[in-house]
Structures are given as structure tokens and as C-alpha cells.
Amino acid sequence: MVVNNPYIWGTGRRKTASARVRIKAGTGKFMVNGLEFEKFFLTHDTRRSAAMPLTVTETRNSYDIWCNVIGGGITGQSGAVSLGISRALCLENVNFEKLLRENGLMTRDSREVERKKYGRHKARRSTQFSKR
């Protein structure tokens, strides 16, 4: 039995955030965790980074996008959404992969927070030196 599924899925991760992205051909509706894109990502930087794959491929009004994002902060979540959209667009159209890769949107940013060490204030910050 063949299931006719119009959705294409992509998964993105950044820091501790994880995003499940679902796209299909449509009119440009963009929902994140049940909210409008502009209401979820409040700053210009997070909006720009989350929608960067659509800007690069010039498909902002060609797809309807639904995202579920968990974990992390708002910056990590926008990066996770960006990677998820990029992966879904590559599955939709193979010609987008070269363009997205040239703009650095297909590579997962693997930087994580370094753990705090005992005897220190933070991961590397030591106590203040006292001469006397």
C-alpha cells in the first residue's frame, strides 16, 4: 500500500536545541510551536537566521512550514530550525544542496557549552589572585 504523504521532514540541532521541521508546497505559512514565525522569534537576528535557507533559495512564499522546537535558548532554536529547513529543502529539490552548502547552511554547528570545573568560578575562570 502506497501512502501519499505531501510532507517532507527535516531534523536540525544546535547547542541543546532540537527542531523537527515539516514542509510542503504552499503559500508561505510559517509556524513554530503553534505560533506565528514573527511571534515566536522576536528579534531580527533570530528571524534572519531561522529563515536564511528560504532567503538563499528564494522560496519564502513557496512552502508552508511547521516546526516543533524543544530545548536550548532562542538562538540555539533558530539555528536548529535553519538546519531542519535546509535538510528538508534538499530532500525536496536536489539542486538546492549546492547553494545551501556554499552558504554554510548544511553543516551542523557542533559547538557545545564546556562544563564547569570544580575549584573554578566557571569552566575556565579562576579565582582572583591575591598577592597578600
Image (cartoon, rainbow, N blue to C red):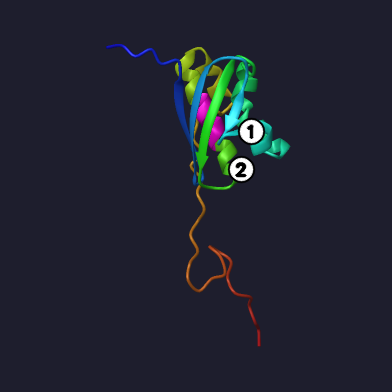
Q: Which residue is mark 2?
A: 75
Q: Which mark is residue 24?
A: none
Which residue type carries mark 1?
A: Ser
- What residue is shown with label 1? 49
Range of residues picked out in magenta: 80-86
Residue nearest the observer in this picture, 7 or 99: 7
Residue 84 part of the magenta segment: yes
Circles 2 and 1 in contact, beta carbons < 8 Å:
yes
Give me the C-alpha separation between circle 2 and circle 1.
Answer: 9 Å
**What type is the residue that disc 2 sits on?**
Thr
* Total count of labels: 2
Res 4 quadrant in image: top left
Residue 20, given in percent of the width and then of the height, sits at: 47, 33
Q: Main secondary structure of the magenta part?
A: helix
- Local packing at callout 1 (Cα closer than 10 Å; few below 14, some 14-19, many 20+) is some
Of all residues shown, which one is farthest toward the left? 1
Rendering coords of residue 67 (x, y %): 53, 31
Identify whether 84 is placed above or below 130: above
